[in-house]
């Protein structure tokens, strides 16, 4: 199983709550080439289908969207959003943002692709 990256989750949640623009590259300082934005409540089997292999992410309890960082199609790390914001404008239930475009815009706690 892959455990949620708690420090990354907390840092991203804090950034989304306090900034208008969140460049995920500034927070995810490890090797990755795309990030999956997984809608709150998406069943694990849907994530497995998107990945092409079994999703074994261990969140404990999920409060919001998942941000699954992939490197060459393999899970590098993942974070769970723990704030009160709403993610809108993303393909549901799973959207993909390439590293070069992994920026979130935040306005009144509404998070949209940047």
Image (cartoon, rainbow, N blue to C red):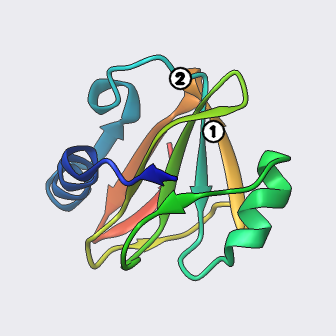
Q: Which residue is found at the position 63% from the left and 38% from the top? A: 97
Query: How far apart in space, not on screen, are marks 1 and 2 (Cα)?
Result: 11 Å
Residue 32, numbered label = 2
Q: Nearer the viewer, mark 1 or mark 2?
A: 2
Q: Which residue is found at the position 58% from the left and 55% from the top? A: 37
Exactly how many numbered labels are in the figure? 2
Q: Residue furthest top?
A: 31
Residue 49, numbered label = none
Q: Can residue 101 be seen at all in this image of the molecule? A: yes
Give residue 44's position: percent from left, percent from top: 68, 71
Based on the displayed image, in which of its 4 quarters is residue 83 positioned? bottom left
Q: Can residue 91 be seen at all in this image of the molecule? A: no
Q: Is residue 88 above or below residue 55?
A: below
Give residue 16's position: percent from left, percent from top: 26, 56
> Looking at the image, which is closer to me, 35 or 2?
2
Side (left or right) of 12 relative to 75: left
Give residue 108's position: percent from left, percent from top: 28, 71
Q: For label 1, count other residues whose C-alpha is less than 10 Å away and answer few (under 14), some (14-19) or many (20+).
A: some
Tag 2 secondary structure:
loop
> Looking at the image, which is closer to me, 89 or 36?
36
Side (left or right) of 80 relative to 108: right
Q: Which residue is found at the position 85% from the left and 47% from the top? A: 52
Residue 97, numbered label = 1
Side (left or right) of 111 relative to 53: left
Side (left or right) of 46 relative to 36: right
Give residue 48's position: percent from left, percent from top: 77, 58
Q: Is residue 99 above or below residue 93?
A: above
Q: Earlier in the sequence, mark 1 or mark 2?
A: 2
Tag 1 secondary structure:
strand
């Amino acid at each position: 199983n892959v455990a949620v990256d708690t420090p990354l989750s907390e840092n991203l949640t804090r950034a989304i709550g306090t900034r208008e623009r969140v460049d995920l590259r500034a927070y995810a300082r490890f090797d990755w080439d795309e990030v999956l934005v997984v809608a709150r409540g998406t069943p694990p089997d849907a994530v497995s289908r998107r990945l092409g292999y079994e999703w074994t992410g261990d969140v404990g309890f999920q409060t919001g969207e998942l941000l699954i960082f992939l490197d060459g199609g393999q899970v590098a790390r993942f974070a769970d959003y723990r704030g009160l914001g709403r993610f809108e404008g993303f393909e549901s239930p799973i959207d993909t943002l390439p590293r070069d475009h992994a920026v979130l815009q935040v306005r009144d706690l509404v998070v949209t692709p940047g």
